[in-house]
Image (tube, helix red, strand yellow):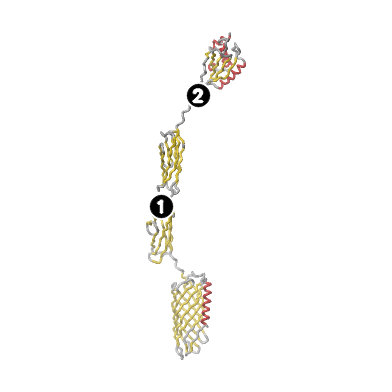
Amino acid sequence: MAIRKTSMLALLLLLVGLTVGAMAQDKPLSKVDVFTGYAWHNPGGSVNGIDIPSIPAGIGTSSTWYLSKNWGLTFDSGVHWRERTRIYTAQFGPTYRFGNYNGIIPFVHVLGGLHYQSISGLDGSSAFGFTGGGGLDMVTKWDRINLRLIEADYLWADHHYTGASATANSGPRIRTGIVWNFGTFEPPVQPSASCNAQPSEVFEGEPVALTASGSNFNPKHDLAYTWDGQGVKINGSGANVNVDTKGMAPGSYPVKVMVRDTKSSKAFAGCTASFSVKAPRPPQVSCSASPNVVMTGDSSTIRANGSSPDGRPLSYSYRASAGTISGSGAGATLSTRGVQPGRVNVDCMVSDDRNLTASDSTSVTVQNPPPPPPPPAKPKASLFNTIKFKKNSARVDNQAKAILDDMALRMQRDADARASIVGKSVKGESKTLAGQRAVNAKAYLTKEKGIDPARIDVRSAQEGGDTTADLWHVPAGATADTTGTDPVKEMKSKMKSKK
């Protein structure tokens, strides 16, 4: 019956422990455990032929000092009592615990020491006692408390009572209770490694520097570095190496490194650094000509606007279908000397230091020079107006004077112009009347209007006309048409006009 009650209690504690300890599986192991709890014991044996019954009432305590995560020294004590029987133990011995297995800590121990037993009616007996067994502790979420789900031991002792037959006690003991924790064995920090690649993106042929470092290794020990990468050529050894990317295809390249303690095969860590080889991009260029239309023999400036998406240095070259082109860099000059009229095609080429190229073209139209402008037209004399005279008269009347006033104003505005006055007559009039009419008109211009006489030429038309005088305006450089006219001797005409 007592065993059944003890088993039920242990099962109850197990369920409670599973509930409160489910979130504490990673709690570190303690350095000191102090147990207090209930104990059931069946000492076995007999005295004077009477069996010693099981003892359901008991208290057990123990203190374990762990010298490492697993090994410890335990001092154990307990007391069990019944109506006629008392048992006391005080023992010492090693304990081994197996570690934390998902919140359960199994342990075993071997103890030896005092075993005292007192039976009513007999003197008490002290003997050497031996205890061997183990148990299961449940980890809880509380820092200083675990639950001892069960501790199952076997106790042995040999007692001799005065006046009674000898007895050898040997029987099981079951305990359960609380384990108080003090101090911890922190789990050792595992070595780690970190690594990186600089730069993380390169073009084929550019170097990559790989660097690795280890942490949580023994600082007194040297470290060894082992680098490995598929399709990667690694130069150097140790924590810092280089990658030669010449000939590598575009893509991503992971490189692994293993860092090891040269004096401990258990201390190692690894990491991976990755870099990418970018696909090269060709340069770009645009070509233009200024001016794009020239005369044969003239020049045009060619401009090449080149750029590299990858920031590579560029070089320029040019080619023309006719003429000569010279220059380097982003500008060149096309000479069209000796080029026939038509279109000249110009190619602009650009290349980077990886021999990737690009080209563009433009054109220049070559034309013959325009013909020279015609010489300026020679100025011509023009008929300004005509004044009328009465028959057989050379008198300048008011109507004629108005016309001569306009003629005078024209000559004043055009100081370099000249005038030609051609007098006319009809058949039956005096042969000198035509000349007199021209002379009288000139006289009005010179005397009344102040025109220089040297600027006015007077002539007479041949027979066959009318009773008028034509006023011709003769610009500088022009010549009056004298066809069918004769110069007038002004003095003779004046004398005749007086008659």
Q: Which quarter of the figure is the C terminus placed in?
A: top right
Between 25 and 420, the one lying in front of the other is 420
Q: Residue at x 44, y 65 (%)?
A: 190
Residue 104 image position (x, y, % from top left): 48, 73
Q: Residues within 10 Å of mark 1 (few under 14, many from 20)?
A: some
Residue 482 image position (x, y, % from top left): 52, 16
Q: Are marks 2 and 1 in contact (CB under 8 Å)?
A: no
Q: Which amino acid, mark 2? A: Ala
SS type, badge 1: loop
Q: How many marks?
A: 2
* Image vertical order of residue 86 relative to residue 271, above or below: below
* Image vertical order of residue 55 relative to residue 312, above or below: below
Query: Which mark, by number, is residue 204?
Result: 1
User: Which quarter of the picture shows residue 473?
Assistant: top right
* Image vertical order of residue 206 relative to residue 104, above or below: above
Q: Which amino acid, mark 1? A: Glu
Furthest residue to the left?
236
Q: Which residue is mark 2?
A: 377
Q: Residue at x 47, y 77 (%)?
A: 135
Label whose residue precedes the other's in the sequence (2 or 1)? 1
- Residue 439 visible in the shown view: no
User: Which quarter of the picture shows residue 113?
Assistant: bottom left
Residue 126 image position (x, y, % from top left): 46, 85
Whole-Å distance between the Cαs marked 2 and 1? 76 Å
Q: Residues within 10 Å of mark 2 (few under 14, many from 20)?
A: few
Between 322 and 191, the one lying in front of the other is 322
SS type, badge 2: loop
- Residue 152 visible in the shown view: yes
